[in-house]
Amino acid sequence: MDIKLITLYKIKMPMRTPFSTHLGTVEDREGIIVEVTDKEGLKGYGEGVAFSSPWYTEETVETSYHMLRDFLIPILRKADLNHPSEAGPLFDTFKRNQMAKAALETALWDLAAKKEEISLSRFIGGTQERIPSGVVVGAKTKAEARRQIETYLEDGYQRVKIKISPENDFEFISDIRRHFPELPLMADANSAYTLNHIDHLKRLDDFGLLMIEQPLEHDDIVDHAKLQKELKTPICLDESIVTFNDARRAIELGSCKVINIKIGRVGGLGPAKKIHDYCLEKGIQVWCGGMLEFGISRAHNIALASMEGFTIPGDISASSRYWEEDISFPEVTVEKGMIEVPSHPGIGFEINEKRLKEVLVSKETFAFEK
Ligand SMILES: O=C(O)CCC(=O)C1=CC=C[C@@H](O)[C@@H]1C(=O)O
Ligand SMILES: [Mg+2]
């Protein structure tokens, strides 16, 4: 792919409103932007979506940076890649660290699509020109959740996801159902329950949730299979699916009826596409998850979600959901509940250089000699 240099930008930006789950609250979002420049001067962009601390998965901004600088960029230096799909298997020489791998791998996909002068969506086989948009409410109180939902429905979002735990689930969900009986609603537990909560969780079946996301442990598929047999509500796996084989095994065991595909969590666009294709073949529904991300990762999500199997609205919301001003432009907007898939080459968004400078923490460049 004739790479000339790679630049890592570490950035930090305040969120418009803090995002809370039972595991903690994010107020300032740190991240890594990866810029890969080829010998013609074309630039591809990826984003490291790990958080500052390891509350969601074991990765952090610092572990991702370490992996990129000390392992992934060096391995890419020695390789002679012809196509971005070769990066995933190459990076799998190293165990896990999926978000670090995805940050670099997605930049290669963007670069390759730009070289072909087609949109990333078309390059990966996307077929949808517009994708349905859902939004996540990360509120601490039910009054705040209700206020946020009202605003999001006015903005046209097609589906709402709320964060739950055994301490707040009935209070939140029954309040929302009372005010919004027809709302397409789902709940994300981020592993707040155990199998001892089976009877408690069965009672949630009455609320007509679209699905419950990751109720049990972050690395479990066995107990989820037991739970799914007891619940009418479909289980969606998020944290448990880190590789293609995790998805294959979970489907074989009956651990879920839906999978949330996050490019960062599974190590890149190549693995994300492979999981999508397998789920489509097996009749398992998929949707594209979010990581409170900046515009680069959001753009990759839009391209992924344009693939045939992504029929459920994902956690892909407008840039303004999280940011006063993003590091890319144009802003992602939601019109009548839909986001347009760009048709420009690559991800179809440009870097907002002024904003990038404002939020920059550090910048490091790695030259490739060949
Ligand atoms: O990016 C978005 O809009 C949604 C983000 C979101 O819901 C999540 C991001 C990261 C960790 C979690 O709390 C949650 C999820 O589990 O999907
Ligand atoms: Mg989740």
Image (cartoon, grey):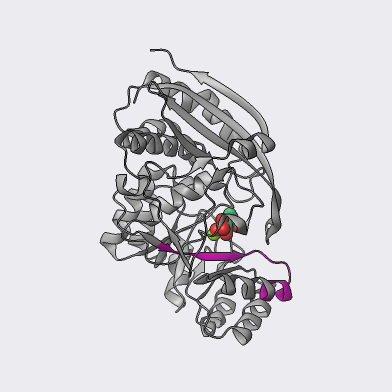
In the visual, does 195 lie left or right of 28? left
Q: Residue 167: where, in percent of width, then height? A: 70, 72
Chain part drawn in magenta: 131-146
Q: Which residue lies furthest to the left in this view?
A: 281
Is 208 rendered above or below residue 159?
Answer: below
Rendered view: 312 above or below 344:
below
Which one is nearer the viewer's eye here, 348 or 220?
348
Q: Which of 25 and 339 is in front in this view?
A: 339
- Tell me: residue 165, above or below residue 177: above
Q: Nearest the camera: 245 or 35? A: 35
Taking the magenta stretch, the answer to whether it contains residue 132 is yes
Look at the image and tell me whether residue 49 can be seen. no
User: In what quadrant does ligand 1 lie?
Assistant: bottom right
Residue visible at 65% across and 34% down in the picture: 357
User: Looking at this view, is 339 or 14 the one in front?
Assistant: 339
The residue lying at 26 percent from left, 60 percent from top is: 281
